[in-house]
Amino acid sequence: MSSKAQPQPRPTTLNFITGNANKLAEVQAILADVEVSVDIDSDSGADGDGKKGQGQGQGQRQRRLVLTSRDVPAHEIQGTIEEVARDKCARAAAVVGGPVLTEDTALEFRAYGGLPGPYIKYFLQALGHEGLNNMLAAYEDKTAFAVCTFAYSAGPGHEPILFQGRTQGRIVPARGPGVFGWDAVFEYEGKTYAEMDKTEKVGDTTPPPPNVAQWRACSSPKVAIHALVGCLLTIVEPDLTSRQGAG
Ligand SMILES: O=P(O)(O)OP(=O)(O)OP(=O)(O)OC[C@H]1O[C@@H](n2cnc3c(O)ncnc32)[C@H](O)[C@@H]1O
Ligand SMILES: [Mg+2]
């Protein structure tokens, strides 16, 4: 049974599987204005009048992706950032029995060759902000990369697609409210994430960054969600009815 060969239905709802309320709030904020016009009939060729895509014509439809959320507690495997992200998404799809969006946040220390990476949650829980700083005490290089990996699966058996954002900063003694994860010790351009309000942290959220280079340079790696949404909205939904009819 090849999951890759299966057609991807185009989603209208993103069911974001997360147990982290701060994560959900940030993704909600980033996606708040997502409303993308997609030419759904552009390839039908039925009329052949060559005027498709004109203003409010029949071939145009305003699409709005609706974000919903629920928690599906599950242990996370060991592996690369991408392996962890794929596994979490595939398992969430299996539990939910439908399309799901998941996200994994990693924090890489350059002095540690990328660790703690996808295991940052456990390092943070065990060591706290001070312990994360202490880990780097023997190193001059305090560079860290915040990496967000969004994964979308169309449902059980559908291979997850991944989009990743990466932001370079450095680890500093905690500044600002310690409300969200490692925000207080990750400094980006002179401010820790905890010293920024949400708007500043997620950066410019509209219009969606048109290319990878731009969202890689954004203040928050979470804006990579735009790239994923853009990809989902361009999926050409297979005509399942006619396929069934054709046997
Ligand atoms: O249910 P899920 O979505 O897995 O939520 P989680 O909190 O377990 O999240 P991760 O598995 O991705 O673990 C990432 C860790 O990094 C933290 N984190 C995630 N995004 C962050 C951000 O933007 N700023 C600071 N800390 C963040 C988060 O609180 C975790 O401790
Ligand atoms: Mg988790």
Image (spheres, rainbow, N blue to C red):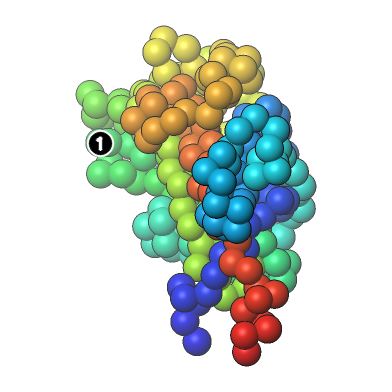
Secondary structure at badge 1 equals helix
Residue at x 49% of width, y 17% of height: 192
Residue 188, above or below 232:
above
Residue extending furthest toward the bottom? 247
The residue lying toward the viewer, choosing from 213 and 182, is 213
Residue extending furthest toward the top? 190
Q: Position of residue 109 (x, y in %)?
A: 33, 37
Residue 144, above or below 195:
below
In which quadrant is the C terminus drawn?
Answer: bottom right
Q: Is residue 169 left or right of residue 156?
A: left
Amino acid type shown at disc 1: Ala
Q: Position of residue 201 (x, y in %)?
A: 55, 20
Q: Position of residue 96 (x, y in %)?
A: 73, 67
Q: Position of residue 179 (x, y in %)?
A: 66, 27
Residue at x 71% of width, y 60% of height: 72
- Residue 46: tell me if it is visible: yes
Residue indicated by mark 1: 111
Residue 246, by quadrant, is bottom right
Residue 120, above or below 215:
below
- Residue 73: tell me if it is visible: no
Residue at x 37% of width, y 57% of height: 80
Residue 204, by quadrant, is top right
- Queried on whether the Cβ of the residue with tag 1 lies below 8 angstroms from ligand 1, the answer reads no
Residue 173, above or below 27:
above
Q: Is residue 43 left or right of residue 80?
A: right
Residue extending furthest toward the front? 49
Mark 1 Cα-neighbour bin, 10 Å: few <14, some 14–19, many ≥20 = some
Residue 76, by quadrant, is bottom right
